[in-house]
Image: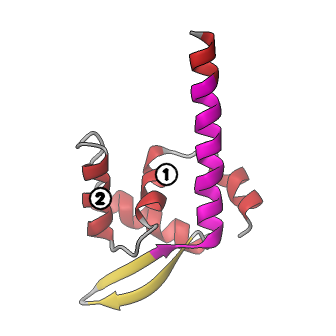
Amino acid sequence: MTVERAKRMYMPMTETMYYILLSLIEPQHGYGIMRHVERITNGRIRLGAGTVYNSLGKLQADNLIELIAESDRRKIYLITEAGQGLIEAELKRLEELSANGRQAM
């Protein structure tokens, strides 16, 4: 999937998809993603296993992440170039939102 197509499908991104993709900047398995997201959001977001694994399947099918290894029934994923482009586009969108909000206030 191209970044442009991913942007049309996923933007604006849900927090779940954003944080899952962000977690996969480094290789990670599902449970590791859940712990990482909880840690970086100071416990504000606690992803359930069903949410994570369903999202991983969708992201993999759309070539935004890839399976890079399997170990002890754990699948290890990593973000693809298209996934990184999507994260960068979402960050730009969020920066614009923030800047416009600050300017209006």
Classify 95 as above or below 100: below
- Sequence-first disc among 2 and 1: 1
Q: Is residue 47 left or right of residue 89?
A: left
Residue 71's tag is none
- Asked if residue 97 lies in the magenta stretch, the reply is yes
Q: Secondary structure at mark 1?
A: helix
Q: Is residue 35 left or right of residue 101?
A: left
Q: Secondary structure at mark 2?
A: helix
> Is the magenta region chiefly helix, strand or loop?
helix
Q: Amino acid at mark 1?
A: Tyr
Give the spatial CA distance, label 2 vs label 1. 13 Å
Range of magenta residues: 78-99
Disc 1 designates what residue? Answer: 18
Classify 88 as above or below 26: above
Disc 2 designates what residue? Answer: 36
Q: Amino acid at mark 2?
A: His
Q: Quadrant of the C terminus?
A: top right
